[in-house]
Amino acid sequence: MFGKLRKSSEKNASEQPVAVAVANAIPEDLPKGSETVLLAEDEEVIRAYMALILRDVGYHVIEAVDGEQALRLVHEARGVKIDLLLTDIVMPKMNGKQLAYRIGQVLPQIKVLFCSGYPEELAARNGMIAPTVRFLQKPVVPQTLAIKVREVLDEANMDFPQGTLEDEPSNVDDPTQNGGQAVLCDDGNL
């Protein structure tokens, strides 16, 4: 399906064995980009992994550890065009749905790609996301990440996700509860 693998140009390979292993596993023929991606992911290893892949295929990546930091970075980056918000759905302090809404108020043309360890259907059914949003299932492989990011960036401008903060379910920060239904997976353990 994909061609040759690239060799990492990482120096100090002994200090960054995971980064080198990931970089060496990224196929050379993945879709490339030069846009700016704001990556909001609370799991450090996942955030570093996704950022490495995105940078390797040419994107400029701004990393945030949670929704509050992402929003702060948007306000600090005035004049920098941020093309895509790639956000985890379940994060402490501010979930991905709230973050997308708030950033959309500041940057109405931004495209949004939600990601989660929860299956898309379950996340939609539990009100964590609208059924029509762009979604990326974790764990993610380099090919899937690069292809999905490129697809979302290449889409014609769409209306910003519908709804208001008031429309959000009060339990979105606690996805294990939704109308008495238990969710049988844990975002942090996938």
Image (cartoon, rainbow, N blue to C red):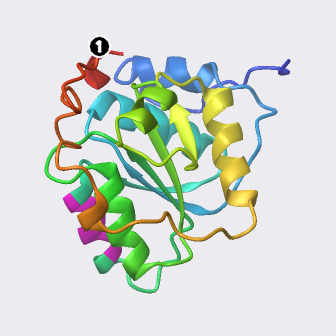
Q: Is residue 79 left or right of residue 156?
A: left
In the rendered view, tell whether residue 138 sits above or below residue 89.
above
State the image coordinates of residue 175 (x, y, percent, origin top left). Answer: 23, 32
Nearer the observer, 166 or 98 = 166
In the rendered view, tell whether residue 26 sits above or below residue 163.
above
Q: Residue at x 44, y 31 (%)?
A: 49
Which secondary structure dominates the residues rendered in magenta? Answer: helix
Q: Is residue 70 magenta?
A: yes
Q: Is residue 127 magenta?
A: no
Q: Which residue extends farthest front?
A: 179
Nearer the observer, 19 or 90 = 90
The quarter of the displayed image where residue 164 is located: bottom left
Segment tinted magenta in the rendering: 68-74
Element marked by disc 1: loop
* Residue 13 appears in the rendering: no
Q: Is residue 68 left or right of residue 89?
A: left
Mark 1 highlights which residue? 184
